[in-house]
Amino acid sequence: MRITQRHKLTFHTGFIIVFLSMLLLAPTPVIAEGPSSAEYGVVLNLSGKQRMLTQKMSKEILLIALDVDKQKNLTNLTKTSALFDKTLKGLRDGSKELRLPPTSSGRILRQLDKIDAIWTDFYPVVKQILDSKTVTNEQVALVARINLPLLKQMNKAVGLYEKDAKKGGLKAAPGLAATINLAGKQRMLTQKMSKEFLLVAYGHEREDNKLALLETYSLFERTLKGLLDGDDTLGLPGTDPQHIRDQLSVVNRLWTQFKPIVEYGSDYKTKEILTGKIEVLAKTNLPLLREMNKAVGMYEKEAAKSP
């Protein structure tokens, strides 16, 4: 059978029509909408918690260096560093255990790469300390130098997650995204001021750390007031749910007990921090952290209620 040019054209035209028909009839692929409001609450909570863990590890290292509850702080350091490592992987790849969805945003993944690069320098120092059960002057200096870049890059990641949350699952409640971010940051500040106090006690760059301590506890105090009653500069709308306000009042009571310790540490008149003061800080910083963490969990639940 001889196929003419006209037959070829008819065949090709028919094929194209059939192909286009199949495309039109094919089911439309479902495009992922991104994390839900509940998932964004978890992401903002746990990425924010990572900031705190950078400071908690540093604080625990300094307590070991100062020989305060050494075995307890070695155990705590093991848990804290392992949790940071697991959560960092979970933020990238997702984690059913942590209830984290995987990160799909290219810019956030690039930011997580920067955090990974610093963590690969920081984590081996932690492991060396855990293996030797001692902390050298060189390790204190290294931790003091590296912990802040790790914190800053982690904080940038939280800011990127917050922006995505405002455009995505929490776009109906952008004030709540900012609130979860800054409430989570308060946890970090409890540990950062404790670390700075202990660096002063250790004698590492004492005057610089006194100034940093003053700035940190001043920010904690301002943010606590802003969480309760609002702060336009910080982007905080204030808190309405009474059960969260009650929890923030618990935090405030603990803060009034903790503040005199850090005030003493930052005072220019303080030449040397006595062991008794270090022990008081070691015991009182964790209740403040725990109660602040409860407040963050309450805000996370509020996020889950958002449409």
Image: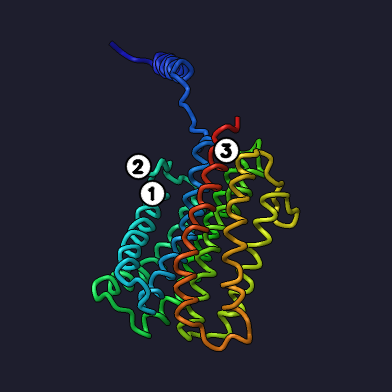
Above/below status of 24 relative to 39: above
Comparing 161 with 236, the one in front is: 236
Which amino acid, by three-letter code, is at mark 2? Glu
- Quadrant of res 185: bottom right
Place of residue 101 in the rendered image (x, y in percent of width and height, measured from the top left): 43, 41
Task: Farthest residue to the top: give it.
Answer: 1
Place of residue 71 in the rendered image (x, y in percent of width and height, measured from the top left): 29, 69
Kind of element beneath mark 2: loop
Which amino acid, by three-letter code, is at mark 3? Ala
Place of residue 61 in the rendered image (x, y in percent of width and height, measured from the top left): 38, 73
Kind of element beneath mark 1: helix
Above/below status of 212 relative to 293: below
Q: Which residue is mark 2?
A: 97
Kind of element beneath mark 3: helix
Earlier along the polypeptide chain: callout 2 or callout 3? 2
Q: Which residue is mark 1?
A: 90
User: Marks 2 and 3, how far apart in space?
Assistant: 20 Å
Q: Residue at x 65, y 62 (%)?
A: 221
Instruction: For label 2, count other residues whose C-alpha is less than 10 Å away and answer few (under 14), some (14-19) or many (20+).
Output: few
Above/below status of 219 relative to 270: above
Q: Residue at x 73, y 49 (%)?
A: 229
Residue 255 appears in view: yes
Query: Relative to residue 302, is residue 233 drawn left or right?
Result: right
Q: Which residue is mark 3?
A: 303
Earlier along the polypeptide chain: callout 3 or callout 1? 1
Instruction: For label 3, count other residues whose C-alpha is less than 10 Å away and answer few (under 14), some (14-19) or many (20+).
Output: many
Which amino acid, by three-letter code, is at mark 1? Gly
Q: Indicate the quadrant containing the N terminus: top left, top right, bottom left or bottom right.
A: top left
User: Marks 2 and 1, how far apart in space?
Assistant: 9 Å
